[in-house]
């Protein structure tokens, strides 16, 4: 069976599609269609570790084959149409589950992994949900290293405040971590924009050599977060990488509808619901210590 999976843009969305893709690979030959925007390059870095790179298409014009089935993994995006951008005998996952809080964009009433897996079961998959693990040859592990996820995201008005907890809050949190444990190793990593908007100001505010700041390529950033003993920060692509690889993860969700996409989560991970009130650094630090010490109550965002 020739299977096309489309619209897996963004690191988080791509990671949430991994179990479905792994399940589909037991049923046939899987091809992936992504776009060519900034978010799509993040998806490519994730997905090339799941399938062969010659089965990832970043331009729908290159798709000439007819597929037995196409699965549109992100249902609210209508850019790609059967018979125009691809050719498939059958199309799954054209469902939309609108949430009025998203101002016209789609959201999911189920957790995204479960939602994606419905497609594999529809095509005859009988097994359990595969793992979200996708990085290979990641053998390093630093239990004292804490990845500080400070990513920004633009909202519909072009503002950068969405998903960001605030540089001053991060400065205070990191200082609390370093005062509490002299062997703690907080790290931050991101692209040049992350450096300008968050990492450089936070580093100046902390003024402590034990805070390490990196601007590696995306694959190196993913390897870094997968080697850490914990993740603390915003709902970012690196948050999904951490959770996908079993790193204890404390995530702050600034948007209510994002909670429906907060999987994958393990028993030691914590969701802080910040869409109604922004928690102070002391509260986040307390939640981090409880997670670190195995005393946190599990919350998967439901």
Image: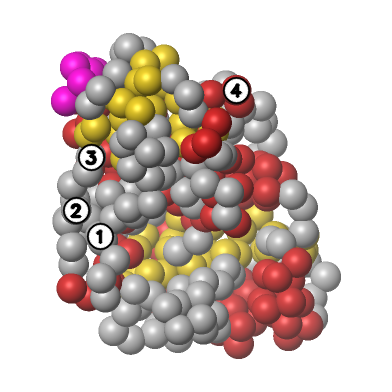
Mark sitting on residue 107: 1
Identify the residue shown where x is 74% and y is 77%: 196
Mark sitting on residue 131: none
Reply above or below: 294 against 272: above
Q: CA distance from mark 4 to mark 2?
A: 30 Å
Q: Which residue is mark 3?
A: 93
Q: Is residue 253 visible?
A: yes
First to last magenta residue range: 122-127
Marks 3 and 4, the one that precedes in the sequence: 4
Reply above or below: 151 against 173: above
Identify the residue shown where x is 19% and y is 17%: 124
Q: CB atoms at circles 3 and 1 under 8 Å apart?
A: no
| Quadrant occupied by the C terminus | bottom left
Look at the image and say whether residue 242 sits in the magenta stretch: no
Residue 224 rendering spot, x and y as whole percentages: 67, 47
Residue 89 rendering spot, x and y as whole percentages: 25, 23
Q: Quadrant of residue 136?
A: top right
Q: Quadrant of residue 262?
A: bottom left
């Amino acid at each position: 069976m020739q299977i096309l999976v489309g619209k897996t843009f963004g690191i988080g969305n791509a990671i949430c599609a991994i179990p479905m893709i792994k399940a589909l690979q037991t049923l046939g030959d899987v091809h992936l269609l992504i776009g060519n925007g900034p978010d799509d390059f993040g998806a490519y870095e994730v997905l090339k570790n799941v399938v062969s790179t010659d089965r990832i298409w970043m331009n729908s014009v290159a798709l000439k084959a007819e597929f037995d089935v196409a699965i549109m993994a992100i249902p609210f995006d209508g850019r790609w149409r059967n018979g125009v951008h691809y050719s498939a005998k059958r199309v799954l996952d054209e469902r939309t589950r609108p949430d009025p809080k998203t101002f016209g964009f789609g959201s999911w009433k189920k957790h995204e992994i479960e939602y994606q897996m419905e497609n594999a079961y529809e095509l005859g998959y009988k097994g359990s949900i595969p793992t979200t693990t996708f990085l290979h040859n990641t053998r390093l592990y630093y239990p004292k290293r804490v990845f500080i996820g400070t990513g920004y995201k633009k909202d519909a008005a072009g503002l950068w405040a969405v998903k960001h907890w605030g540089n001053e809050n991060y400065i205070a949190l990191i200082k609390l971590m370093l005062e509490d444990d002299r062997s703690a190793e907080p790290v931050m990593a991101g692209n040049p924009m992350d450096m300008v908007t968050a990492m450089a100001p936070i580093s100046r505010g902390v003024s402590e050599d034990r805070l390490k700041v990196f601007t590696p390529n995306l694959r190196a950033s993913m390897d870094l977060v997968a080697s850490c003993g914990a993740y603390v920060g915003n709902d970012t692509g690196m948050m999904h990488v951490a959770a996908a690889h079993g790193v204890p993860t404390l995530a702050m969700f600034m948007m209510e509808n994002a909670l429906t996409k907060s999987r994958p989560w393990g028993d030691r991970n914590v969701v802080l619901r910040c869409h109604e009130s922004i928690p102070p650094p002391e509260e986040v630090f307390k939640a981090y210590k409880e997670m670190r010490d195995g005393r946190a109550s599990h919350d998967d965002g439901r």
